[in-house]
Amino acid sequence: MKRKDSQEARFFNGIASYCGFNDIESVRKFYFAFIRHVINDLKVNEKVRLPLFGYFYKKRMKARTGRASMLRMGNPHLPSVQHDLPERTRISFRSYDALRDYFRNR
């Protein structure tokens, strides 16, 4: 849990220093407002484009049968528990080629 918190703090601190925010709470408000805006746009559209950066899009996952293998930890002789996972929609992000190339060539 501590690692997630430190990653989040580095992320928000980086945005604050790069964009000129005065405090982390302002960064948090901006970030979560941005995410809400993207989610609301995706309810209407298939893609949300961010110029020169990339795009968010909906990805439909088919219904499938999953296994709860975590229940077997410590006792490999237990049978694997199977359950049905319903069809669902995920949000994915794809960056533009120029952005990916920039980070590959650094």
Image (cartoon, rainbow, N blue to C red):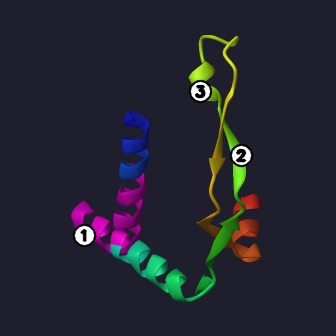
**Mark 3 vs 2, N-terminal side:** 2
Query: Considering the numbered disc 1 on the image, is that residue within a helix, a strand or a loop?
Result: helix
Of the numbered discs 3 and 1, the one sitting upstream in the chain is 1
- First-in-chain label (1 vs 2): 1
Residue 1 lies in the magenta-colored region: no
Q: Residue at x 30, y 65 (%)?
A: 28
Dominant secondary structure of the magenta stretch?
helix
Amino acid bearing label 1: Ser
Label 2: state its secondary structure: strand
Q: Which residues are magenta?
A: 10-32
Residue 61, position as x, y percentages in the image? 69, 62
Q: Nearer the viewer, residue 79 or 48?
A: 79
Disc 3/disc 2 C-alpha distance (Å) = 15 Å
Task: Return the residue at label 1.
Answer: 26
The residue tagged 2 is 65
Instruction: Select label 1 or label 2 by which is in front.
Output: 2
Q: 104 or 45, which is in the foreground?
A: 45
